[in-house]
Amino acid sequence: MKFERLATDGAARAGRLTTASGVVETPIFMPVGTHAAVKALGPDDLRAAGAQIVLANTYHLFLRPGHDVVRELGGLHRFMGWDGAILTDSGGFQVFSLSKLRKITEAGVEFRSPVDGATHFLSPEIAVEVQQALGADIIHPLDECLAYPVSRSDAERSLDLTLRWAARSRAAHLGPGRTSQAMFGIVQGGVDEDLRRRAARATVEIGFDGYAIGGMAVGEPKPAMYDLTQLVASLLPADRPRYLMGVGKPEDLVHSVARGVDMFDCVLPTRNARNGQAFTADGPLTLKQARYTRDGAPLDAECGCYACRGFSRAYLRHLFMAGELLAYRLLTLHNVTFFLGLAREMRAAIVAGAFGRFQSRFFARYAVAVNAEPSAAEPDDAV
Amino acid sequence: MKFERLATDGAARAGRLTTASGVVETPIFMPVGTHAAVKALGPDDLRAAGAQIVLANTYHLFLRPGHDVVRELGGLHRFMGWDGAILTDSGGFQVFSLSKLRKITEAGVEFRSPVDGATHFLSPEIAVEVQQALGADIIHPLDECLAYPVSRSDAERSLDLTLRWAARSRAAHLGPGRTSQAMFGIVQGGVDEDLRRRAARATVEIGFDGYAIGGMAVGEPKPAMYDLTQLVASLLPADRPRYLMGVGKPEDLVHSVARGVDMFDCVLPTRNARNGQAFTADGPLTLKQARYTRDGAPLDAECGCYACRGFSRAYLRHLFMAGELLAYRLLTLHNVTFFLGLAREMRAAIVAGAFGRFQSRFFARYAVAVNAEPSAAEPDDAV
């Protein structure tokens, strides 16, 4: 994997990530494909939306259909019919947020599958093996992800474990079964600046192909998230890509790119689509509102996606109110197109040395709605 | 509307129906778009599947979003983004099968909406007005559709009402508000041959642009359905299209084309897709079966649809088991492609004077599975 910085504007960066499955132009948003599918979208839709890389959840694929099945069928790319880049998380976040009866030891974590109740064990080495079987272009070390708030001593203990697991993961990744896959380190450390500093330095010391900032958007105040992101990004090597896990809303993307982040993933555009929410340059639009019943305009007159080219708000509202599956596809397609377009616009602004002006224009126009906060690196599970 | 018979082979006919929205080559299958959308498919998918005409349910659109909304937004074609032909039923079947508290009088039928409990009234004249607002290319008169079994006297009384309503519907359709829409008459009469004969003759006497055979596939034995279809078709004018409402399985389509039917609609390919069933030339395939877990073959190696070109049975099974929305789109796309391909093959065989050979080949290969019977003209409502 190769990462080139093509332009910078303040802390913001425009880059090019060359993976085994093609080029990813950063800043980039990665649609979430929890079960090896971005909910309601086919690879044809993803391409049309401008997607270059998608995320798949190791935890979910490990449990169903199983990484051995995916490997037998040629790996994730072939399995899901997506020839662009793929990134897998390590499964850590989901083990800690979704599984019951977790038992954490130095060796790894034992947990029970919510699918069939079976007991499973993930160690740093097994998580690497599973991700090698899945075959994504970018993989991650097993980490412990703490909820917010947490005591300083718990945060410290957890960070130490995550760092020891990171070293074991990297060793396993560079070991005998080595693949062409890249591995990103994950910087944890909760909301404590000192711990985040330590986490960043120690993770960089192990040495990875890129760096993820984990444990954000788990309930901490927004200013803390932006400050910590800025702090961590400033401690990461400039010549490696930086990925802010599980973030976020359009405004979060803009704030974070301004702080030096290159990559994002979030269930927001896909999940909110299934709740009837469409993102536009003027802010989110909630289709269940009666005001759209006879609205012949497209969701977003500036958008070129299939949903906006072919259909009115009135029709999309009708589909949504009637529970028609087509509503989910069209709204998801639009939202993913919007997030990818936002990333593309930020990139162009950085290249033009006009990212400050872009931010002013964006925030002058984008009306921030009061929504449920998206959770970090959450799988996209609910319909 | 113009209908040309291009070839016949026994009772089977290959024709060309020219509607205000383009040509429909018969025999044809019409995917069911209950709420102005074929479940899980966009117009792009429908075109790719080879669809030329789709059905929409007047009853559902009358209740939600309301025919006035559809008219205001430019009619059904523009509303749903489908520039091919559209056929609407009259709403009669759904009033009788879905609504509670029906009160039938000579004037029309009063019923309560299952959406919001409001009371509505449909008369033959109002049903025409509603369908004129919706703007489909082919519309239908309000009819009474009886359940099976039914007493001879009830069937007779019902048929008489349906015939009086048919005359009023046709008069309303040809009246002052006349549009370029075509209207098909509906031949009812239950399972009684005499009543079906009377129904056919009286309906033809009123005079319509085409003829639908209604009240089939409501629980009567299959041989009775085929015999009655043959009887009714033989009494209809050869130069008008014949539409068998709510039918059916692939084998029913073949048997009915052999008896002179030109058009079909059924929820089977769409509904069964959402239950994980895929139709193939060898018979239906049930994806939840464990045997497909590692099956790298496409659903149907002979099919050129996106689902078969891009994905394995194993992947589609995985999507279905995980409840992924993409499974519904891909399986529906495949099934609709299969039904439309079957119609196209029958047409080619008739044109080639080889429909007998086609039937032998089809039945030698197609393994009929034991499934739930599809109901006539049923809206496609359940996920």
Image (cartoon, coloured by chain):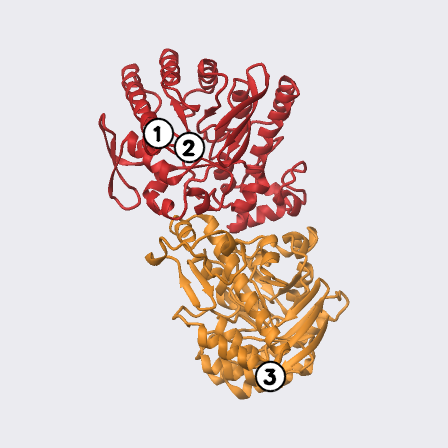
Chain colours: A red, B orange
Q: Which mark is residue B83?
A: none
Element marked by disc 1: helix
Amino acid type of disc 3? Ala
On the image, the x and y values in percent for residue A31 come to 49, 36
Q: In this view, does A347 lie above or below B373?
A: above
Q: Residues within 10 Å of mark 3 (few under 14, many from 20)?
A: some
Can marks 2 and 1 be said to lie on one chain? yes
Can marks 1 and 3 be said to lie on one chain? no
Q: Which residue is drawn at 35% across and 53% down?
A: B293
Quadrant of image for the C terminus of chain A? top left
Q: Residue at x 58, y 62 (%)?
A: B57
Residue nearer the viewer, A165 or B57: A165
Question: Which quarter of the figure has residue B119?
Answer: bottom right
On the image, the x and y values in percent for residue A73 come to 39, 48
Amino acid type of disc 1? His
A82 to the left or right of A299? left
Element marked by disc 3: loop
Residue corresponding to mark 3: B11
Amino acid type of disc 2? Gln
Residue corresponding to mark 1: A173
Q: Which residue is drawn at 42% across and 58% down?
A: B275
On the image, the x and y values in percent for residue A277 come to 54, 38
| Chain assignment, label 3 | B
Tell me whether circle 2 and circle 1 mark residues in contact (CB < 8 Å). yes
Residue corresponding to mark 2: A181
- Which residue is farthest front? A176
Visible in this render: residue A118?
Answer: yes
Q: Is residue B12 above or below residue B263?
A: below
Residue nearer the viewer, A209 or A297: A209
